Each structure stands twice: as structure tokens, then as C-alpha cells.
Amino acid sequence: MKLDKKHENRMEFIADVSTSFANMVRRYSISRVPVLAIDQVTFYDNSSPLWDEYIAHRLGLLPITTPEKTPESAEIVFSLDAEGPKTVYSSEMKSSDKDIKVAKSIPIATLGPNQHLRFESKAILGIGRKHAKFQAGIVSYGKEGDSLRFMVESCCQMEPAEVIGRACDVIIDDIEAVEEALGKKPAKKAKKAKKTEEKEEKEEKKAKKKEKED
């Protein structure tokens, strides 16, 4: 694999893989990579020119940074309290998690004198197969000699390279799940328990060795 071009949230790379594998990576990148997006909005005051539903729709499409190890049960609250005259931007929204924020400063609404906008919204984890607002990026590919050129554009929740990397992780998880169902691989829980047991044994040996040295 060879990185060819990279610019902001876009990148291109060349890989020697089959078209069937490339299409699997493309489809997983678009529809199976989990990202955060606003799913619920509670309005406390809205005297802006825009309806609640219109603003809620705009909020749902805001790109939110999504760390790799974000748990499936994550619920991040974003709040805003703004008064005109001014243009309200997404960067003014306060997050309940300092590591998770709106990735781009995007206009939400323009407030006139004495107009007020106050709401609380909740972001959850989802995938593009469920709704387009959970889409991590766009991936395409084309023939270039005997290789394939991939074009990746992230929706700004993560780096474009991460879109491909996380898609591959999901593919591996699905393959392992199939192997497990067919009885060709030990259950993940048992495997994890064994690793934990081995780790505890190593730590115990280290502790005993340290006691002897002391």
C-alpha cells in the first residue's frame, strides 16, 4: 500500500488488492464505522427565525469528533445559550466531555436583537447503515495499472486514514464472529479471560521476585 495524496480530510492511496476486497472495505467504511451524532434536542427557548425542527435537523448533521474507543452506550450532552444580535456557531456549543466536541465551526442560526436560542442536545453512537448522519466518510476506488487507487473523504469525525483503519477493524470482528459461530475459534470471552489470567500470573511472579530482592 502506498499513500499518494493527503489534504485536510481527504486522502488517496494505492493498494494491490482484489476488487472484491476493495468493495468490502468501501462498503464497511461508508456504513459500518460507528460515529457520534446528535439524536435528541430539547429546546428551552427559541425566538430565532428558524423552527425547532429545522434547527434540530441542522444539529443532527454536525460532525462530532469520535475517539476510537468510544463505548456503544456513550451519551454526550451539548448545550447552547445564546442571545442576539449575532450569528450562532456550532463552536459555541458546550460539551459534557472535554475530549469530544463539534469538529467544525458551522453556522446554526442568525439571531436578531433580543432573540434567544437555548437548548440541550444528546449525541449517541450510530452507523451509516442506520442513518446518513452517522456516516464516517465517502470511499471510492478505481483501476490504476495492476493496482487500485482509493479515494477517501472523511466527514471530519476522524482522520481519513482512520475511516479505513476502523472499517478494517469491524471487518476483522465480523470474521471472528463467523468463525466463532462455526466453532472454528474459541469464544472471545474465554480468550479474554485467558489473557487476563496470564497477565495476573505475570504480575504475581513479578511481585514475588521483587519481594525476594527486597
Image (tube, rainbow, N blue to C red):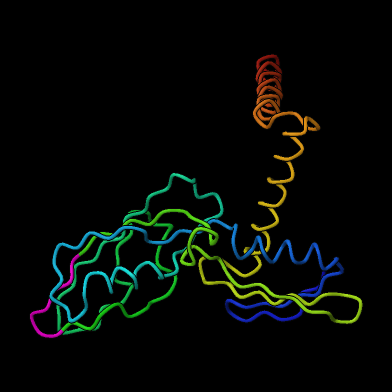
Q: Quadrant for the C terminus, please.
A: top right
Q: Percent position (x, y) of residue 53?
A: 26, 70
Residue 109 lies left or right of residue 197; in this view the side is left
Reply yes or no: does residue 114 show up in magenta. Answer: yes
Which residue shows up at 22% across the image and 70% down it?
52
Q: Which stretch appears magenta?
A: 112-118
Residue 151 lies left or right of residue 112; in this view the side is right
Check the image and name the residue furthest to the right. 146
Instruction: Using the image as rendered, state which of residue 5 and residue 153 is in the foreground.
Output: 153
Which residue shows up at 22% across the image and 59% down it?
42
Residue 26 lies left or right of residue 122; in this view the side is right
Instruction: Using the image as rendered, state which of residue 181 and residue 69 is in the foreground.
Output: 181
Q: Percent position (x, y) of residue 86?
A: 20, 84
Reply yes or no: does residue 141 show up in magenta. Answer: no
Q: Quadrant for the N terminus, please.
A: bottom right
Q: Percent position (x, y) of residue 84?
A: 15, 81
Please determine whether, in this image, residue 91 is positioned above or below residue 211.
below
Which residue shows up at 45% across the image and 69% down it?
63
> Residue 197: which quarter of the image?
top right
Please determine whether, in this image, residue 31 is positioned above or below residue 204.
below
Residue 136 lies left or right of residue 168; in this view the side is left
